[in-house]
Image: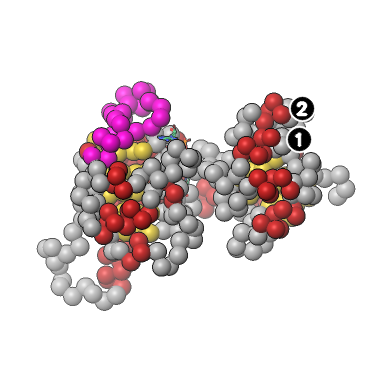
Amino acid sequence: MPGRKKVYVTRELPEKAMETLESRFEVEVWRDEMPPPKSILMEKVKQADGLICLLTEKIDREVIEAAGPQLLGISQVAVGFDNIDLEAATEKGIYVTNTPGVLTETTADYAFALLMAVARRIAEADRYVKAGRWRVPWGLMMLLGQDVWGKTIGIIGMGRIGSAVARRAKGMNMRILYYDLVRREKLEKELDAEYVDLETLLRESDFVTIHVPLSPSTRHLINEERLRLMKRTACLINTSRGPVVDEKALYKALKEGWIWAAGLDVWEEEPTSPDNPLLKLDNVTASPHIASGSIETRTKMALMAVENMTAILEGRVPPNLVNREVLKVRPPSS
Ligand code: NAD
């Protein structure tokens, strides 16, 4: 249909979201499972009015500078947006949006599931049984784990997901410590959570779970020095972004027993190489960045990204604008 705005989508979205998008715009989709190469992205943003993308696409300054003046917005299907150069987008008057909130409970479910799996060695037990290694009918000392009930959890980043994890921890009768840039006094009262500095959190927690965004201030926040502060019986759970943890230091910590185990949904490089030494350790439970991956939630995320894009292309302020300064560069037209 002539006159319709053009949207380039870097992966097939769930059906309901595709239908909504196609009923409103002229849509072109990159149909491969792998992300589109940078050269394709640079070519597509020359023509498109809007770009809907995933966190696997590196939307750096070069891609943004390749965009034609008609590109009004980038709608990311994720809450994290560390793959997008916000400064470059803002300078060019491009609106950038994300999908917060709809994935909070799903991601918190997963973080807690990973915590329990690590504590009770569930992935290891699965490998043990399937490999035919279960010979003793019932072993008093077989695959012993750590208790979760009543233990101390340390939450790094008490935002939407961190506080949803805290609510689950409360249900497990845990002592809740948290560290954040911002103090959450209301939550402290609601959950009996204690605000502590990072060092205290690491020293006192049995489970440390990370929920900060990736930024210059959180890159390698968990490094060798901080891992050395943790208890030898502690477990580290990361469902935030891989580079928040220094993987080389974590490998040493796990191999040399400074900490007990780790559950990792996110990696410094994704996909992580099959040669990553962390994958050779029995005390690592690994998953491929699936913490928000429930059928319902992925559909909600895609629909939210479509609504953000629709608002941008209709000249409105989108509900989930992340670079608010852009409103000064290009105010909404309606
Ligand atoms: P949020 O913005 O609600 O919470 C983040 C919290 O981290 C905030 O309270 C903020 O103050 C705090 N913070 C930021 N920088 C900090 C620092 N240097 N030190 C201490 N605290 C700091 O975000 P959210 O919705 O809870 O999501 C958190 C992150 O989880 C996202 O940015 C994303 O990277 C990640 N995530 C991963 C998955 C997955 O599939 N594995 C799914 C969803 C979200």
| Horizontal arrangement in the rendering, residue 203 relative to residue 100 (left or right) | left
Residue 197, magenta (yes or no): yes
- Which numbered disc flags the more N-terminal residue, 1 or 2? 1
Kind of residue at disc 2: Ser
SS at circle 2: loop
Left or right for 134, reference 1: left
Q: Residue furthest right?
A: 2
Q: Quadrant of residue 40?
A: bottom right
Q: Nearer the viewer, residue 251 or 124?
A: 251
**Picture quadrant where residue 254 is located:** bottom left
Q: Which residues are magenta?
A: 177-203
The residue depicted at 71 percent of the width and 29 percent of the height is: 329
Q: What residue sits 44% from the left and 49% below the top? A: 243
Query: Is the residue marked by circle 1 packed among few (<14), some (14-19), or many (20+) residues within 10 Å?
Result: few
Give the residue at mark 2.
334
Q: Position of residue 17 (x, y in %)?
A: 65, 49
Pick the quarter of the image with the C terminus: top right
Disc 1 marks a residue whose amino acid type is Glu
- Residue placed under numbered mark 1 in the picture: 314
**As rendered, which of 202 and 295 lies closer to the eye?**
202
- Identify whether 106 is placed above or below 38: above
Tell how many labels. 2
Quadrant location of residue 310? top right
167 shown above or below 138: above
Percent across and percent down for residue 87 are 62, 37
